[in-house]
Image (cartoon, rainbow, N blue to C red):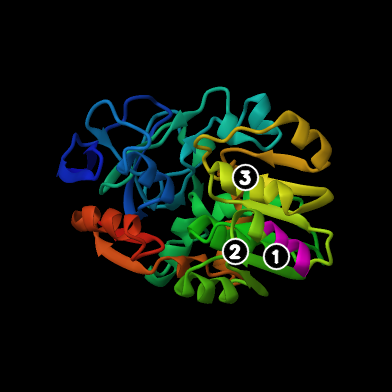
Amino acid sequence: MRGAVLYGPRDLRFEVRDMPTIIKPTDAIVRNSATCVCGSDLWPYRGIQPVAQPTPMGHEYCGIVEDVGSAVTSVKPGQFVIGSFFASDNKCPNCHVGYQSSCQNRELVNTAQAPLLRVPLADGTLVATPNVPSDDMVPSLLTLSDVMGTGWFAAHAANVKPGNTVVVVGDGAVGLLGMLSASQMGAERIIAMSRHDSRQKLAREFGATDIVTERGDEGVDRIKELTNGVGADSVLECVGTQESMMQAIRATRKGGHVGYVGVPHGVELNGEELFFAHVHLHGGPAPVRHFLPELIDLVWKGKINPGKVFDLTLPLDQVAEGYRAMDERRAIKTLLRP
């Protein structure tokens, strides 16, 4: 089997990897119908998050179950399934309150850019769709494995309610799907912070009512101007930099909520400023498994089409070009077909 392996900054190769097999009785083997490149994959690709050795890549996946371990009871061969980037037992105290990405027995699923994938803790991680989906539904179902689930969690963590004014910091795939999530949750006004025409167009499709191109303090000033000096009820932080986090906090009204899902790199919060900001902060790695049943239902019934976020589709053996296109901002998100 061949799959994606990262050797170092911008050195992504498609090469022979070991065929996955059942190692534990709780494992499942999934034949991927599609996988993709995530914005968070670009951190190690760019060398910002160094890799110490050749590292298999990929954490977004959906496909057909090929085999299961002897202890697996919730899915069976032939079913189409979706799972999270963190495998979870779905039984521990953290899982019981909806935080499967902090499962006490969690395992990272990070070898998904390949035709076959071993998924540990299959009973607590994989969710089957009602039937095998049509091919045109697969991209939207794939987004549920991470970016749509993460965008949904961002809106959930930011306490988006019907009638709210929402700001989304970040116009990557997660930010765009955070806009779709906020719209689905009934937000009245969604302000997208974006400087890119193609992303602004998709933001509008996903429910954005306003576009703000300014960043930093200028961006905060523009948000205040649009909200009569008050700020937004809910802000989704979908980038993970110092500037984006501070922009999110400062654009939030007193008593408002920030949902932060951008993987933080160099983010430090000043205690005194945070003390007087009077905002709620909640976020972290999205507990995708908690939201999968609801999101699968929304896609299955045609109520949302998050697969529109893929603007480049390539065969899996061209995965390196998929990374380059996203790194150079020629693509929002690359879909890979094995």
Distance (Cα) linking label 1 and label 2 = 7 Å
Dot 3 or dot 2, earlier in sequence: 2
Q: Residue at x 32, y 43 (%)?
A: 46
Distance (Cα) linking label 3 and label 2 = 15 Å
Query: Which residue bears the numbered disc 1?
Result: 222
Q: Position of residue 87 (x, y in %)?
A: 48, 34
Query: Which residue bears the numbered disc 2?
Result: 214
The reply to whether dot 3 and dot 2 touch (C-beta < 8 Å) is: no
Nearer to us of marks 3 and 2 is 2
The magenta segment: 220-226
Q: Nearer the viewer, residue 310 or 297?
A: 310
User: Label 3 crowding class (10 Å Cα cut-off): few <14, some 14-19, many 20+?
Assistant: many
- Classify mark 3: helix, strand or loop: helix
Q: Position of residue 112 (x, y in %)?
A: 33, 44
Question: Quick check: 120 above or below 302?
Answer: above
Number of the label disc, if any, that sits on residue 245: 3
Q: Position of residue 19 (x, y in %)?
A: 21, 37
Q: Nearer the viewer, residue 295 or 244?
A: 244
Distance (Cα) linking label 3 and label 1 = 16 Å
